[in-house]
Image: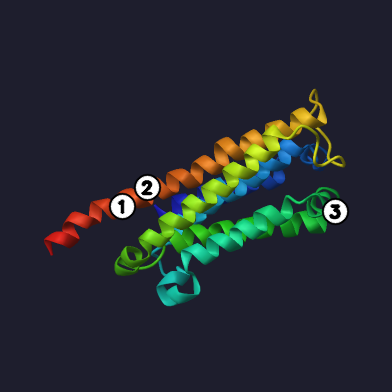
Amino acid sequence: MRAVLALLGAATLALAWLGPSPTLRRAFSVHMGLHVAVVAVAAPLLALAIAGGRLDPVRRAPAWLPPIPVSLLEFAVVWTWHAPAPHHAAQHHAGWWALEQASFLFSGTLLWIAAFGGTGPQRSERAAAGVVALLLTSMHMTLLGALLALAPRPLYPSCGAYPGLSALQDQHLGGAIMLLVGGAVYLLGGVALTASVLRRAPATEGA
C-alpha cells in the first residue's frame, strides 16, 4: 500500500510539473492548479506512504515535528508565495518557480507527516494536535481562496490569463480552485483524523 501511495504521489508531481507548458503556467488559474496538486494531492499521498514506516521522522524525533507549529510554517510558505512580488518572481524566473514548488511540497508533506506519522502510541498522543493543524490549514486555504475569488480587481497584473478568460476571471477561477479543492482536502484530512481518534476512544476507555 505504501508503494502505491508513493507512486500516485510521484505521478501527481510529474503531471503537475511536466504537464503544462511554461507559457500556460503563467496563467494564474493554472499556477494555482499546480499549487493545489502539490500541497493537496501529492503531499498527503507521499506523507501517508511515509507515515508509520521506517523513514517516518516522527518515530525518531516527534518533538521536532509538532503538528500545530508545522501548520504555521505551511501557512507562512503559502501566504508568502501568494504575495504579489514573490508570485511575480515565481511566474517569470525558473529558479524562483522551482524554489516555490519545492517549498510547497516540503511544507505540505511535513504537515501531513506531523499529523499522521509516528508509532501507534505516538499517533494517539499527537492526534488532537494533528486535527487542529489540518483544520487551521483548511481555514487559511479557504480564506485565501475566497479573497482571490472575490477580489474586485486583478491582484497579479503581471500574470497571464487562461485563453478565453480575462485576468480577473482567471484570478477568480484560481481562487475557486484553492477554495474548493485545497481547503476541502485539508478539511477531510482533519475529519478522517478525528474519526480515527473516536474509533480508538472506546478501546482506551475499556482498557
Q: CA distance from mark 1 to mark 2?
A: 6 Å
Determine the residue positioned at 64% across, 44% down.
144
Q: Position of residue 29 (x, y in %)?
A: 72, 36
Determine the residue positioned at 62% across, 40% down.
178
Kindly indicate the quadrant of the structure image that contains residue 80: bottom right
Is residue 31 visible in the rendered structure shown here?
yes
Q: Is residue 44 left or right of residue 126?
A: right
Element at badge 2?
A: helix
Q: Are marks 3 and 1 in contact (CB under 8 Å)?
A: no
- Disc on res. 26: none
Q: Earlier in the sequence, mark 3 or mark 1?
A: 3
Label 1 amino acid?
Answer: Ser
Q: How is the image coloured?
A: rainbow
Is the residue marked by circle 2 packed among few (<14), some (14-19), or many (20+) residues within 10 Å?
A: few
Q: CA distance from mark 2 to mark 3?
A: 38 Å
Q: Position of residue 151 (x, y in %)?
A: 73, 35
Element at badge 3?
A: loop
Is residue 50 visible in the rendered structure shown here?
no
- Mark 2 sits on what residue? 192
Label 2 amino acid?
Answer: Ala
Task: State whether residue 169 is above or below residue 200.
Answer: above
Q: Position of residue 124 (x, y in %)?
A: 31, 64
- Disc on res. 196: 1
Q: Earlier in the sequence, mark 2 or mark 3?
A: 3
Is the residue marked by circle 3 packed among few (<14), some (14-19), or many (20+) residues within 10 Å?
A: few
- Disc on res. 93: 3
Q: Position of residue 8 (x, y in %)?
A: 52, 47
Task: State whether residue 154 is above or below residue 66.
Answer: above
